[in-house]
Amino acid sequence: MADLRINLGGIESPNPFWLASAPPTNSGYQVQRAFEAGWGGAVWKTLGDPIINTTSRFAALHLGSRRVVGFNNIELITDRPLEENLKEISETKKRFPKHAIIASLMVEPRREKWHEIVKAVEAVGVDGLELNFGCPHGMAERGMGSAVGQQPDLVRQQTEWVKEVAETPVIVKLTPNITDIRYTARAASQGGADAVSMINTINSLMGVDLDRWLPIPHVDGKGAHGGYCGPAVKPIALNMVAECARDPQVGIPISGIGGIGTWRDAVEFLLMGASGVQICTAAMHHGFRIVEDMIDGLNNYLDQRGIASVMEIVGKAVHTYSDWNNLNLNYKVVARIHEETCIHCNKCHIACEDASHQCIDIVHNEQTGRETLVVREEDCVGCNLCAIVCPVEGTIEMVEVPTSLPPLSWNQRQAALAANEDRETG
C-alpha cells in the first residue's frame, strides 16, 4: 500500500483527507469521531468572538433524482465559547497526537486581537492555524471574512500580524468572491503564509419560494446571500487551485477545497497542485464514513500505477494547464457514433443542428431498414456537444485525426505574422 502521509506547509497528517472548517468540526465529539473513522486532519470550526446564529440557515439545490448538488448556508462562526473549544481541542490532540488539528480563526481586524487568539489556540496544542478570510456573509459585514479576502493589502497585513507571534504553520483561506484569486494568494504569500487554502464559499441565493415569495432559506420573512458549496462548485475551485499552483508569485503549498466528495475528486485536486484536500458538504450529506472509500480508492489508484507516496502526484498536471493562446490550433478531433450502442434518441442530431455546426446526418440504412446517425467528419469542428448530450456513455467517441499540419498556437501564429510583416517592410 502506498504511503498516504502528507506534509502541507509543515503540517503533517496520516492522509490527505481533512474535514474543512464547518459544522462537522464544531466540537471535540465530532472531530474525535471523524478521526476514528479515518480522517487525517480537521480544521476546527472557526473560532472568534461569541456569535449568535439564526434559524434557519441551510438550503440545498437538488437536480432531478440527485440530492444536494449544491449547498448554501448563512451560518456564522462557532457560537460555542472559546474556552470550551480550547478545552476540547486539547483533549482531542492528546487522544490523537498524529492527526492534524488546525484552528480556523476570525477576529476583528486589530493586531492585538489576532495576537491574543493565536497565543490562546497554540497553547492547547494545535498543529497549525487557518485564517478565515473567505466567509462571504455575516462576518464580512463587520469587516472580517471575505471583506478582508477581497483586499490583498488587508490579507497581507493581517497575515503579517499573525506571523509576528505564530509558532505553528499559518494557512490563509481565500474567498472566491473576487475577480482573480491569484492576487490575494500572492498577498498571503508576501505576508509570510506557509500555505493557502481555497476555495471558501461563493455568494449565492439558493432559490425563491413560489408560494410565499420568500428567499430560500428565510429567517422570519427575510433572506440574505449565503455561501455556496458542494459538487456544483468543484470546477470553479479546481481552476482557482490550478491558477495559483502555476503562479510562481504564489509559491506556497495549497490546501484544495470545493466540491470534493470522492477519491477521484481528491486526485484531481492533488494533480493540479493541492498538497491535501478539505471536505465538508460530502461529509454533511453522507457522514464521516465516506473517508473509508476515499482512502481505499486513493490507495488503489497509487498502487496500480506503482506510486509509492501520495506526495509524488502533487502538481503533476499543473504544467498541462495553460492559457488559451498557447493551445495547438491544428489539433483536431471529430465525433464518431457507435451504431451498436446508439439508442437513436437523436439528441446528438438535435444538439448539432440547433447549437453547433450541423454535421450529423440522419441516413436511411438499406441493410437494416433503420435510420442511422452519421457524422460528416469534414464539417465536424470537434466541439464535444454531441458526446456531452448523448445519454449512453461511450456511444459517441471523440477521435483524434491527423491534419498533416505542424502544431501552431495563437502566440506562434501572431509571431509568424509579425515576422513576415517585418521582412516585407524591412
Image: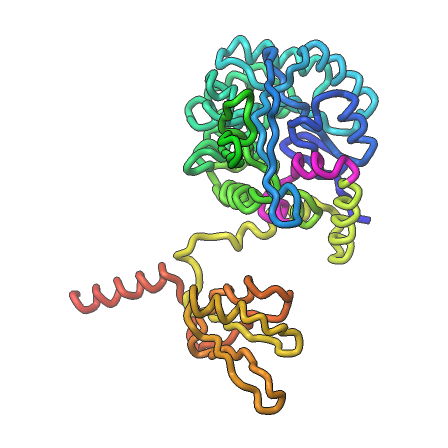
- Check the image and report above or below for 182 versus 343: above
Report the quarter where the C terminus lies: bottom left
- Check the image and report above or below for 11 versus 85: below
- Check the image and report above or below for 342 versus 228: below
Which percent across, then down, holds residue 140? 48, 21
Name the image quarter holding residue 269.
Answer: top right
At 59% from the left and 74% from the top, the residue drawn is: 344
Name the image quarter holding residue 54.
Answer: top right
- Toward the viewer: 41 or 221? 221
Q: Classify residue 7 as left or right of residue 225.
A: right
Magenta-highlighted residues: 268-289
Q: How many marks can you see? A: 0
Which percent across, then down, holds residue 146? 48, 26
Which percent across, then down, holds residue 235? 55, 47
Name the image quarter holding residue 178.
Answer: top left
Q: Classify residue 162 as left or right of residue 35.
A: left
